[in-house]
Image: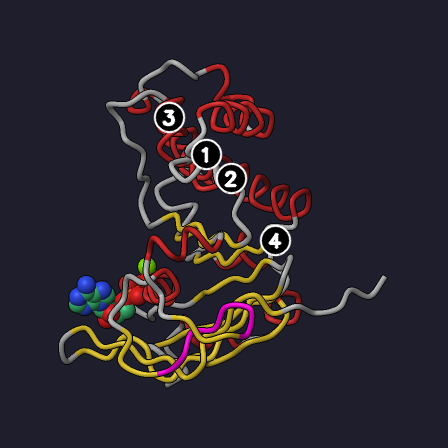
Amino acid sequence: MIMKKEILLQLQNISVYYGGVKALDSVDISLDKGEIVALVGPNGAGKSTILKAIFGLAPIHSGKVLWHEKEIEPIPHEAAQRGIAFIPQGRRVFSHLTVEENLEIGGFILKDKHKLNRRIEEIMETFPILRQKKKAKSGTLSGGQQQMLALARGLMTDPKVLLFDEPSLGLAPKIAKEVFAKIKEINEKHKTAIMVVEHNIKFSLKITHRAYVLNKGEIVAKDTSQKLLKSDVLEKIFMGKLV
Ligand SMILES: Nc1ncnc2c1ncn2[C@@H]1O[C@H](COP(=O)(O)OP(=O)(O)O)[C@@H](O)[C@H]1O
Ligand SMILES: [Mg+2]
């Protein structure tokens, strides 16, 4: 079945400076309904800055951000209201709070207590381990469980778009694989569009439809993940052979 392409999110010609440092140079990116896209590239390439720009957390110097093909000014609380969830780099759970309390914070938009509890129940269907640990302080969870909690918390509002920065950071390969499997499952079951930043190219290209390769603030390649996996462009960039 051929689905009609529907563009959710676009960056057009986006440049970002931190002080005098150019972090993004005329970047064009799009995310369609239902797809998973990877942003890959070496450290400092500008991957996190792209997610921050979408969520209103980067100083955009020029260019446009479009939501459903209309220009918007990215501001964090408005992004959340539109249905964009952002999971920043590094495990960001409130370790002194319980699993359940963390999920409640993730659902802050759901003002109705009944709706909030129902959503927590739904989320726990997807993350059975979190049900078992519902009353545990998040700081006592393993690294992988904390990352699952960060993901679950991001999904509390049932977002249309999920921005996930470095899901596998600090996790053993086996655990990272489980997190990636969960990301894929969420995309397939709920058709959530996902933009994932990941330093582990193999993990990210295996679960994504398309990928953008960044280097020094510029997009140096974009293609389907399958084609990128077969090409030598990634090797060239990561070996520093591409300037
Ligand atoms: N808050 C900041 N202040 C100054 N420079 C920053 C800041 N955040 C990122 N940078 C710089 O911007 C560039 C891109 O960073 P980033 O988007 O974090 O890269 P990546 O996520 O690909 O590793 C790097 O040169 C980095 O040092
Ligand atoms: Mg980063």
Q: Residue at x 18, y 73 (%)?
A: 18
The amino acid marked with disc number 3 is Ser
Residue 69 % position (x, y): 55, 74
Residue 21 % position (x, y): 18, 78
Q: Residue at x 36, y 70 (%)?
A: 73
Ligand 2 lies in quarter = bottom left
Which numbered mark, 1 or 2, is in the foreground of this view?
A: 1
The amino acid marked with disc number 4 is Ile
Look at the numbered discs 1 and 2 and tell me whether their residues touch, using CB distance below 8 Å.
yes
Residue 149 % position (x, y): 42, 32
Question: Going from the N terminus, do you reach mark 1 or mark 2 first?
Answer: 1
Q: Residue at x 51, y 79 (%)?
A: 221
Residue 229 % position (x, y): 60, 66
- In the figure, 68 relative to 180: above or below? below
Question: Going from the N terminus, do you reach mark 3 or mark 4 first?
Answer: 3
The disc placed on residue 148 is 1
Q: Secondary structure at mark 4?
A: helix
